[in-house]
Image (tube, rainbow, N blue to C red):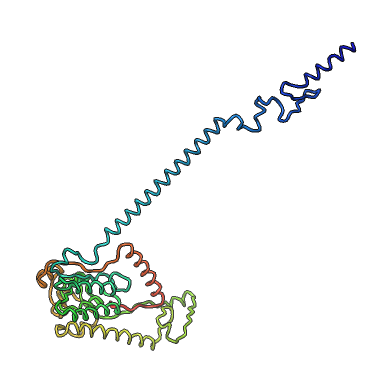
Amino acid sequence: MEDNANNDTPSQEASAHDSNGGSRDNKGRDHRRGGGNRSGRGGNRGNPRRNGPSKEWKLVEQLALQSLEEQKKARRWGVFFKLAMLAYVVFIFVALNPSTAGDSASSSKSHTAIVDVSGVIMAGREASADTIVGGLRDAFEAKHSKAVMLRINSPGGSPVQSNMVYNEIMRLKEKYSDKKVYAVITDVGASGAYFIAAAADEIYADPASIVGSIGVISDGFGFTEVMEKVGVERRVYSSGDNKAMLDPFSPMNEEQSAHFGSLLNNVHEQFIAAVKRGRGDRLKGTDALFSGLMWSGEQALPLGLVDGMGSPGTVARDIIKEEEIVDYSKRPNALQSLVDRLGVKVGATIAESFGSHLVLK
């Protein structure tokens, strides 16, 4: 019995070692690092890359690559469409921007040079002195221009801008004495626009055109009583006693009002002098001509405010005797015009916030 027990001991010890050189204790526990059979499923649990990526991993990788490729394509198409849109916008702006130097083919032969005075006459606008004067200089300097025509459709505007154009026309007429200047009023040629027209050698209008309004105006509002009712207190700080005299929230001051009236009268006298200088003895009316009244083109003819009835086309054909017309008007491109108008609007709003503004109206 004892011998048999001793003989079984080596076999039990041998069986404690598996074929991979591992060892087990007498309770059958595996003491190898990682445990279990290395070739078995449990042996690869800590490092799944030993037998290569799984099918699931390959699928995820493939989907990620496809997603990146789609994103690249989307970016390329996005850039393409943005460039296409930019090109389209540039094309539209170019299409909307007519030539500002006249047609070269037409200007190589005898023609009537035309310059527009359109819209409110104000710095920064299409009818600013800089814009109009630039077109006038080109029109006079053009070798083949027979005469210069001002095509007017404006209610007036700044007396300063109007006077600058008037003086430049007078200077150019003296420099180019062989070229006459004709003003043709279409819908409206009033106030500052008529100021400019008076510099022309002859003025023509349609029978239904609005002509005249030789006067100066400065308008605003007064809110003093409203503020009292609402209970608002106005606080104004200035370094001069009369600096805030145009403040619409302050009560009227008789001395300040009289002073501002004299200022308007002075500008009005300048306007009257310019009209008399330009029209001379052709003016047949009374002092009512300079009272700010307006007339139709037909009514303005016997008053001497205009010399005849006609349109730009008929004046070029029948009066100037040169039917070919070349436009020398300076016009900003569409984009610049939009930016300028936004800037002018902001500037005008700020200026008006400080009080009344002076215009020929």
Q: Residue at x 39, y 75 (%)?
A: 351
Q: In front: 164, or 189?
A: 164
Q: How many marks?
A: 0
- Which corner quadrant of the image does residue 32 belong to? top right
Q: Position of residue 334 (x, y in %)?
A: 31, 62
Q: Residue at x 17, y 70 (%)?
A: 113
- Relative vertical location of residue 152 with respect to residue 259 in this rendering, above or below: above
In the displayed structure image, the side of residue 18 where residue 39 appears, left or right: left
**Quarter of image, res 221:** bottom left
Quadrant containing the N terminus in the rendered view: top right
Q: Reply above or below: 126 against 79.
A: below
175 or 166: nearer the viewer: 175
Which residue lies most toward the right here?
2
**Where is residue 56 shown, x and y percent of the image?**
55, 31
Q: Between 216 and 93, which is closer to the camera in this rendering?
A: 93
Give the image quarter of residue 295: bottom left
The residue sitting at 41% across, 78% down in the picture is 248
Residue that lies at the very extreme toward the bottom in this rendered image: 255
Query: Looking at the image, is 101 positioned above or below residue 6?
Result: below
Measured as percent of width and height from the top left, residue 357 is found at 35, 77
44 up-or-down from 108: above or below: above
Tell me residue 172's x, y (percent).
21, 79
The quadrant of the rendering that contains the C terminus is bottom left
In the displayed structure image, the side of residue 301 where residue 155 appears, left or right? right
